[in-house]
Image (spheres, helix red, strand yellow):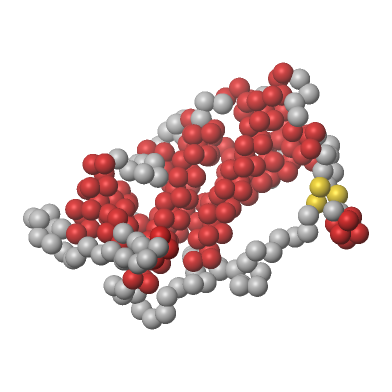
């Protein structure tokens, strides 16, 4: 299912600000240092993944008119969409990289107290993330595990290797016998906002298509769905740390206080 686009008027709106004591993330002793830093980084991961998903949704508010065609407008739109999808992929891999090798943090009493307070769904999502990061899941047994296994083992970094990007270019513009399939395109204007190397977008798309073996649309849909699942689990971990572990409440600033600030 494609993401539901936000309305134009509500695109940047959030609930009103709440505040809490910032001392929450300061470790009280040496054993808490890595745990506090790790949870703070998870909050950063949440924001980053939220932002790229937000950008992905916004693209659906600004689809070019008419059917997809070989025009500069459609090329720009397709390139932007592909870029955001690759950013989402990169964030998945970075999240797994963050988790990998931090067994002492994950096994600490403080962090385990947070995990035990999660809902069954969030707890399962987090456990699957840890298994994928550490490579301990064995043979994937559900779609989420299959997806994370592909992210960990098949999808490369945001910038593919030189041989990989060239392979994607060949795939997009030439058939296996070397016959040209289509021309390469470029937009040239008077400033950066008006320039675009459409052929580079095509090379990246060709590389992604080769990796996913014809299942790119299915992969995109799952990526959107699982991004939400992952971020819901991360949100719960950070929130439980603040409220349950640190016993800290959130407070809503009054309108008078906000006006004085």
Image location of residue 40, percent across then percent down: 66, 36
State left or right for residue 128 relative to residue 155.
Answer: right
Q: Residue furthest right?
A: 256
* Residue in front for this viewpoint, 83 or 91: 83
Which residue sits at x=57%, y=24%?
A: 103
* Residue in front for this viewpoint, 216 or 203: 203
* Residue in front for this viewpoint, 86 or 134: 86
Image location of residue 192, percent across then percent down: 40, 60
163 up-or-down from 65: above or below:
above
Image location of residue 188, percent across then percent down: 31, 65
Q: Quadrant of residue 141?
A: top left
Which residue sits at x=46%, y=50%?
A: 87
Which residue sits at x=62%, y=42%?
A: 44
200 up-or-down from 118: above or below:
below
Q: Residue furthest front?
A: 190
Q: Residue furthest top?
A: 30
How many marks the image carries: the answer is 0
State left or right for residue 249 relative to residue 193.
Answer: right
State left or right for residue 69 relative to residue 38.
Answer: left
The answer to whether residue 121 is seen in the rendering is: no
Image location of residue 246, percent across then percent down: 80, 34
The answer to whether residue 134 is seen in the rendering is: yes
């Amino acid at each position: 299912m494609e993401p539901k686009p936000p309305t134009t008027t509500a695109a940047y709106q959030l609930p009103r600000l709440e505040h809490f004591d910032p001392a929450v993330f300061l470790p009280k002793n040496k054993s808490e240092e890595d745990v506090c830093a790790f949870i703070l980084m998870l909050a950063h991961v949440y924001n980053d993944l939220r932002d790229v998903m937000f950008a992905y949704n916004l693209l659906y508010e600004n689809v070019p008119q008419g059917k997809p065609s070989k025009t500069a407008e459609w090329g720009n739109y397709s390139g932007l969409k592909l870029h955001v999808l690759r950013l989402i992929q990169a964030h998945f891999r970075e999240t797994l990289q963050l988790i990998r090798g931090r067994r002492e943090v994950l096994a600490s009493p403080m962090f385990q107290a947070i995990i035990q307070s999660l809902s069954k769904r969030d707890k399962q999502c987090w456990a699957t993330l840890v298994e994928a990061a550490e490579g301990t899941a064995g043979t994937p047994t559900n779609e989420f595990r299959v997806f994370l296994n592909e992210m960990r083992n098949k999808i490369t970094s945001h910038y593919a290797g030189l041989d990989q990007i060239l392979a994607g270019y060949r795939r997009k513009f030439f058939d296996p016998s070397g016959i040209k399939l289509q021309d390469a395109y470029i937009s040239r204007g008077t400033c950066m906002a008006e320039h675009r190397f459409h052929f580079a977008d095509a090379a990246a798309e060709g590389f992604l298509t080769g990796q996913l073996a014809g299942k790119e649309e299915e992969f995109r849909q799952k990526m959107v769905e699982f991004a939400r699942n992952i971020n819901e689990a991360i949100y719960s971990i950070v929130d439980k740390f603040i409220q349950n572990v640190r016993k800290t409440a959130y407070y809503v600033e009054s309108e008078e206080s906000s006006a004085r600030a």
